[in-house]
Amino acid sequence: MTYTQHASALLALGLPLVGSAVAGFLIHMTDTILLGWYDVISLAAATIATSFWFITFIVGAGFGNAVAPMVAGAVAAGDLTRARRVTRMALWLSLAYGFVAVAILWNAEAIFLAIGQTPDVAAEGQRFLRIAVWGMFPALAVNVLRNYLSAQHLTSVQLWVTVAAIFANAGLAYALIFGHFGLPELGIRGAAIGSVIIQSLTLLALAIYADWRLPEAALFQRIWRSDNEALRDVFRLGLPIGLTSLAESSLFTASAVMMGWIGEYPLAAHGIALQLTALMFMFHVGMSQAATVRAGGAYGRRDEDELKRIAKTALAVSFSFGFFAVLLFVLAPEPLVVLFLDPEEPARDIIVPLGVTLMFMAALFQFVDAAQIVALSLLRGVQDTTVPMWLAIISYWVIGFPASYLFAFTFGFGPAGLWLGLTTGLGCAAGLLMWRFWGRSVRIGQGSVVV
């Protein structure tokens, strides 16, 4: 295949995944906007609480994310039985991890107070999480099914199911947060209830589709039967994926914690900037998922030349979009920031300038952020996850976290310095992970699996 053909194939597979990622993020963004209109304390509490929910989720999501390269490789090799086996065991591991998540998040208020959040933010955050944590089970299972379907190049359904969820969530959250249509006014708890309901309905829709579209897979038949070999394989590949994602996402959570030390208004501005940055990042998420599937297929066929072309194409596509994101953040930051605030919000004149400054800082790391997620996706495609995990941990926590603290507090740069430290960590990750892929993992001719 030529590079043009590779780009067309990547976009055909990835664009529905991008749309699905954006749509899924818009569900969360809708809740954030509504809570921002409700009050600033709810917005700040939701920022810190959802950050902790996500970093807890992301570890367990590693088992589902392992499904994409494993199933893609199995399908390319003609082993459909293995594709079914690893998907089932990923569902087992995700369910088991859900109980771990409940134990971690149930008493979140004490954690929030211990890390320096205000009592009001800590209390509201716990109210949110004691409801939202029950959505962990369907969310993890949805992640498994998304990866299973993506590996089989069935991506359009994910987009349409998630688009439908946007509208359902918007109406439900609006009613439950503000108390409309005869429902009680529940504030931040209403946002949590709505999320759990939507996650459960999404799981039901994808499970029905997977069973209907791939009946020969018999995915859910005798799902209670254990498969120790597949269970070990998914765990061995998926745990480093989850811990790698944890290293990155927890860095951003730590940034929210440190921003909370500066004040509630900077934390609210930080939450807005993170939402907008993450929205742009959804393009890279979708394309990286497509790159993992395509790299996994090349790995299953042991085609090194094809893998190299897939890698170069994925980088070119992600960098092109990164340029667009930079222009948007630099040319129109204020109209984006004000979307998240009630026009009558008393602190509006404080939060908006802070948010605009952080949008300029976010523009700095668009390319390094794109490079590091593409590198990770390619490494996962060839089932190389353990060494990349350590490279990520070093980049984010040995380099990125200290840099954020030094720039923000020691050097006195404040919120902007905190984001400069994030850029430093992401840049190191991009360089080290690219070195790992091009220096070693791209050479798959021997056919050895590295985990």
Image (cartoon, rainbow, N blue to C red):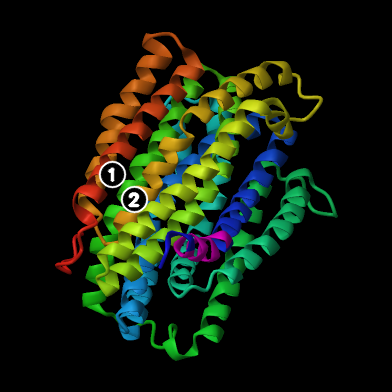
Disc 2 versus disc 1: distance between alpha carbons? 7 Å
Q: Residue at x 43, y 8 (%)?
A: 412
Residue 312 screen position, x and y as percent:
38, 52
Quadrant in the picture for residue 158: bottom right
Question: Is 13 colored magenta in this rendering?
Answer: yes
* Residue type beneath disc 2: Leu
Residue 438 screen position, x and y as percent:
25, 49
Q: How many marks?
A: 2
Give the residues drawn in magenta, as a range.
5-15
Image position of 315 (left or right of 387): right
**Of 272 and 70, the residue lying toward us:** 70
Image position of 443 (left or right of 338): left
Q: Is residue 175 above or below residue 231?
A: above
| Residue at disc 2, secondary structure | helix
Image quarter in which the N terminus is found: bottom left
User: Which residue lies under the disc numbered 2?
Assistant: 376
Question: Is 56 colored magenta in this rendering?
Answer: no
In the displayed orientation, state which residue is furthest to the bottom: 216
**Of 262 and 292, the residue lying toward us:** 292
Mark sitting on residue 433: 1
Neighbours of disc 1 within 10 Å: few (<14), some (14-19), many (20+): many
